[in-house]
Image: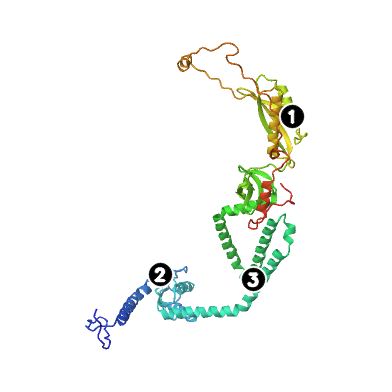
Amino acid sequence: MPDCPARPPVIAVLGARPTMACIPCPQRALQMLLHGLVVATLVISLLMPVLATAQTSSEPVQTDSAIQLDGKAAPDSQIRRRIVELLGEIDGFDKVGVSVSNGVVTLAGEVLDNARQTQLTTMIERIDGVVAIENQTLVNGRLDERLDSAFSRLKERTRNIIANAPIFFVAMLVFVMISAFGWLVTTRLRIWQRLAPNSFIAEVYSAVARIAFIILGLVVALDILNATALLGAVLGAAGVAGLAVGFAVRDTVENFIASILLSLRQPFRPNDFVEIAGDMGTVARLTSRATILISPEGNHIRIPNATVFKGRIVNYTRDANRRFEFELGVDADADLAAALSTAVDALQSLPFVLRDPSVGAWVKEVGDSNVILTFTGWVDQTRSSFLKARGEAIRTAKTALESNGFGLPEPIYRLRVDANAAASLLPITDQPRGDAADPSPQPAPAAAETPLPAAADPARVEDANEEAATRERNAPDGGGDLLSEGQKAE
């Protein structure tokens, strides 16, 4: 586009033929904006009557009044005069016209909003002698009048707030004082620690007490404001919201409630060796969400408290005495009573095997190539390692049986080979006959007894898991422990 010559700007008239003079670019943009505003104004001015007419309530409204016969009906002039007097006393109906014919009231004119339109019909229904109402009033769509009405309501509400400000501040002060007193009672005073069995339950008691004080302060404040009816709506909304949130976080709420019940029942203690839902380990900590175990391999296992509460719990540490059991097989032609007696004597000679309860032994079953013997014994887990004690008991019983001539045969499998197949697979050779042909294997001489290594000594109790559990409980970011040594266990 060529540069415009320096000349006075040309103002175009809407709808006129454009001139050939150039207009600078900023003025051209302003001209287009003015054209858009003019078009929008025309469209709005055309639609306003349509919008106002759309809010007309022209359907006749029947009243409950009985239709009187001639001579008994109220005069139309009297009905109209009464309606006009009422409308003159109420603000917002000064542009409403009234006509009455045979008890049928026709209303015309303008009102500020739909609420005034409904109020007008409801009020005239109560006048004696009115048979029907035909409300043809329009909702005023003029912006200035609607704003004047809104500003009037705003001014009225502002005056009410200013007038009620002192009593509102008193109610707020009472609410704050009651809530602060509840906070002081529930946090500063250590009464809950003396009432609750552990610190977690004390925190639950404290939280419930704080909520109770807040609700009490709210009730007193609303009573001062003479708005106690609002409390029911607030509590109802809070209940519905709490129900919705409860369904949304059902698992979290379930775990929290399970943690409360577990902290009260105390089914296990710290450092107890337990089995929960198939997982075995040493108890490290019980939190508000999960139970933490340290597995024998040193791994951390987190089990949700809901699973712990509803699941099967096996506590191997609650009773210090624990029974071990193992099986050994002897020859089918051996003296079973002598074998049982030999193994029992060997087990009873072990220092870590308890005398009461005593050692047990019995014949379990006849196997394919041997007879299965079962042996049991009891150890004190506080003084001996259970796994090492069981291993040493197996070694001692096996050595005693073999030393007294009882064989512990390996499984024997009988193979049947067809003669023709054997002849085709194996070459026929002359085999030497006599004792030198295939001497029977001789049993190896008994080896000297090897001392037991220190790592396998049953008196050496492993405490690595207990140390790991202690570190877990003392971790700064691990949360509180709901288990208590002093609380009575379930």
Point out which mark residue 346 bears: 1
x then y, percent, for residue 269 = 70, 48
Viewer-nearest residue: 44 or 97: 44
Q: In which quarter of the view is residue 360 placed? A: top right
Q: Disc 3 designates what residue?
A: 221
Point out which mark residue 225 bears: none
Q: Disc 2 designates what residue?
A: 60
Sequence-earlier tag: 2 or 3: 2
Q: CA distance from mark 2 to mark 3?
A: 48 Å
Q: Secondary structure at mark 2?
A: strand
Residue type pointed to by label 2: Pro
Residue placed at 50% from the left, 17% from the top? Answer: 417
Count the numbered circles shown.
3
Q: In this picture, is 176 found above or below 360?
A: below
Viewer-nearest residue: 262 or 375: 375
Q: In this picture, is 287 found above or below 55?
A: above
User: In the image, is 130 to the left or to the right of 9?
Assistant: right
The reply to whether the C-beta atoms of the residues labelled 3 and 1 are less than 8 Å apart is no
x then y, percent, for residue 192 = 72, 60
x then y, percent, for residue 322 = 71, 38
Residue type pointed to by label 1: Ala
The crowd level at tag 3 (other Cα within 10 Å; few <14, some 14-19, many 20+) is: many
